[in-house]
Image: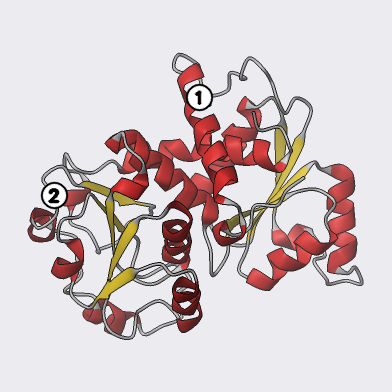
């Protein structure tokens, strides 16, 4: 049993094994329907319990299909349907109940501490479906998509992020160290990655370049990533933030300074940070990116359950 909480804590050899397995499983399903089960049924009879403290479309649907295709089943519960430390039941006791009824727990949470606490008390694997500081399942799937499109290891590519410093970027930074790829970050002043993140980068002797100019960050990029600037639960002055990011919009001018075959990726949902011309254009692969969540998360579940080939 292994947890999947933060990319920086998982050995790169294990991450690469997950990607290799996902590639094989995707190929084997070329003519399968969504609910058809993989021939080997590796998680037959297993139950994945999912809980969402934050809204979700892709994570909810992709994990549902992932466990189904592996031969298992899933149940989704809302936070108000569990005691979670309230009503006289401790989080440890809740974890014991989850471990009794389920075989795995996928948590999309508004608290980094909560997922760490669960990992201490659960006797089943926990998967981080998103937390305030990390989105590991999204970013590992994104690496899979990049290598699928470019047909080469991500270590040989120039990767650019243009946008806010958030949980997705934190996981991208972690993956840049794990997979040794060059990462340029374009963001306004005062929106740069936190000092604790950059201290960890320096400790691992990795070079990440930060630009307060989007055009500079995008030069010679093989792939440009972005995310919604104003997230659903952003407790900030939204008018000011939109103004601060006005020169960081992904548009045709920015795309032209990257490589001719540059790929645009966005974890969704999108906002005004990207124009329709780019988002719906020939360099955008956002739908392929979203679909690949299923394949990679299947292999993540197999890794957690000790069933990875």
| Precedes in sequence: disc 1 or disc 2 | 1
Is residue 204 shown left or right of residue 299?
Answer: left
The foreground one among 179 and 293 is 179
- Above or below, 63 against 212 in this view is above
Relative horizontal placement of residue 145, taking residue 3 as reference (left or right): left
Gap between marks 1 and 2 measured at Cα: 29 Å
Measured as percent of width and height from the top left, residue 72 is found at 72, 29
Residue shown at the point (54%, 58%) measured from the top left:
55
Q: Residue 67, located in which quarter of the rendered image?
A: top right
Query: Could you say which disc has been placed on residue 24 in the image?
Result: 1
Residue 199, disc: none
Q: Position of residue 143 (x, y in %)?
A: 41, 46
Is residue 30 at least partly visible in the picture?
yes
Task: Tell which of 18 and 104 is nearer to you.
Answer: 18
199 on left or right of 98 = left
Q: Which mark is residue 259?
A: 2
Quarter where residue 49 is shown: top right
The residue depicted at 23 percent of the width and 44 percent of the height is 284
Query: Looking at the rendering, in which quadrant would you find the N terminus?
Result: top right
How many C-alpha atoms fall within 10 Å of the one at disc 1: few (<14), some, or many (≥20)? few
Q: Secondary structure at mark 1?
A: helix
């Amino acid at each position: 049993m292994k947890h999947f909480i933060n990319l920086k804590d998982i050995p790169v050899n294990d991450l690469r094994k997950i990607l290799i397995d996902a590639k094989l499983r995707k190929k084997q399903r070329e003519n399968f329907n969504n609910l058809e089960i993989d021939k080997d049924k590796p998680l037959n009879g297993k139950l994945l319990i999912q809980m969402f403290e934050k809204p979700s479309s892709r994570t909810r649907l992709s994990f549902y299909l992932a466990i189904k295709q592996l031969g298992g089943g899933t149940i989704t519960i809302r936070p108000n349907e569990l005691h979670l430390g309230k009503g006289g039941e401790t989080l440890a006791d809740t974890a014991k109940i989850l471990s009794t009824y389920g075989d795995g727990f996928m948590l999309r949470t508004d608290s980094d501490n909560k997922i760490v606490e669960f990992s201490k008390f659960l006797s089943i694997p926990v998967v981080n479906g998103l937390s305030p500081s990390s989105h590991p399942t999204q970013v590992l799937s994104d690496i899979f998509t990049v290598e699928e499109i470019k047909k080469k290891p991500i270590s040989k590519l120039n990767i650019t992020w243009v946008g806010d410093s958030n949980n997705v970027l934190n996981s991208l930074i972690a993956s840049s160290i794990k997979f040794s790829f060059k990462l340029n970050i374009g963001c306004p002043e005062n929106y740069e990655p936190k000092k604790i993140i950059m201290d960890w980068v320096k400790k691992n002797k990795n070079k990440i370049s930060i630009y307060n100019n989007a055009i500079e960050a995008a030069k010679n990029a093989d792939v440009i990533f972005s995310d919604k600037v104003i997230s659903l639960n952003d407790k900030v002055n939204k008018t000011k933030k939109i103004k601060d990011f006005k020169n960081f919009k992904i548009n045709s001018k920015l795309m032209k300074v990257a490589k001719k075959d540059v790929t645009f990726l966005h974890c969704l949902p999108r906002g005004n940070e990207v124009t329709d011309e780019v988002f719906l254009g020939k360099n955008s692969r956002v739908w392929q990116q979203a679909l690949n969540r299923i394949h990679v998360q299947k292999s993540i579940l197999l890794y957690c359950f000790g069933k990875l080939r």
